[in-house]
Amino acid sequence: MSDAADAGELSEMPLEALTACHECDLLMLKPELQLGESAHCPRCGFELYMSRPKVVKRSMALVIAALLLYFPANFLPIMELSLLGQNSTDTVWSGVHALYDSGMQGVAVVVFLASMAVPLLKLLCQFLVLLSIQFKFGRSYGLLLYRIYHHMREWGMLEVYLMGTLVSVVKLIGLADITLGVGLACFVSLLLVQVWLEVTMTPHQIWEALSGEDDHARH
């Protein structure tokens, strides 16, 4: 009876006051958190979310760093290959171009989307969302862009491209002279910054900041 009564009470609460566990789907009242505190599901122990200070400013710094790394990561040499007296310099963009010229247009398009286009679009969406929160304008567009960003999250696969590059280096290292380029360092740095950004830019604080409910995200 108590469970049924609790369910009835929750059904009468406004949606803004409720939250659900992503792991076990338990519906519960949304807890009020102070900065640095985290909320866990009472049934399965899954961390629901955490309230981090200065989310917008820290995320903005990481987005700008990622945008600055994006172009050298994709257009500077990843490695230089010397084989039988012939030298070649490879970049992410030259790899896409080589696939397209060799007749594998479909593969080239997929690699271009997953390693170049989608990661850039994700960063631009994040940047514009953070701008709308920081300067309190265009919140409706910010909400739309953040939804678009969440739909694109699974399409950016920089780590897959990096693993492919490392496998190629290991296989070729005994056949040719390989010199790792600045582009590879920028590519690895871009991947690490994006992972850090995913951790820092907590979704629940961004959603609440876009709706004007969370001031801790900016301060």
Image (spheres, rainbow, N blue to C red):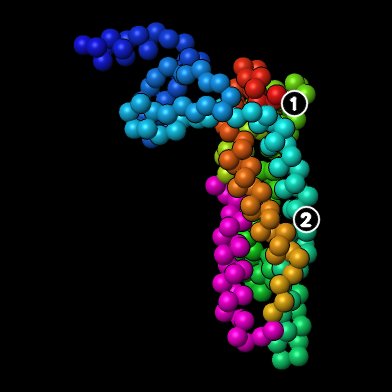
Q: Are marks 1 and 2 in contact (CB under 8 Å)?
A: no
Residue at numbered disc 2 = 71
Q: Nearer the viewer, mark 1 or mark 2?
A: 1
Dot 2 lies on which element?
A: helix
Q: Is residue 106 visible?
A: no
Relative to 54, 48 lies left or right: left
Image quarter of the N terminus: top left
- Most foreground residue, 149 or 209: 209
User: Residue 37 location in percent, x, y?
Assistant: 52, 26
Amino acid found under the numbered disc labelled 2: Phe
For the stretch drawn in magenta, the main secondary structure is: helix
User: Residue 96 location in percent, x, y?
Assistant: 69, 65
User: Residue 18 location in percent, x, y?
Assistant: 45, 18
| Disc 2 crowd, CA 10 A, few/some/many (<14, 14-19, 20+) | some
Which picture quadrant has residue 34?
Answer: top right
Relative to 166, 80 lies left or right: right
On whether residue 172 falls in the magenta region, the answer is: yes
Q: Is residue 214 above or below residue 200?
A: above
Which picture quadrant has residue 94?
Answer: bottom right
Residue at the spot x=71%, y=42% of the render?
Answer: 62
Dot 1 lies on which element?
A: helix
Residue span colored magenta? 154-177
Q: Is residue 143 above or below residue 88?
A: above
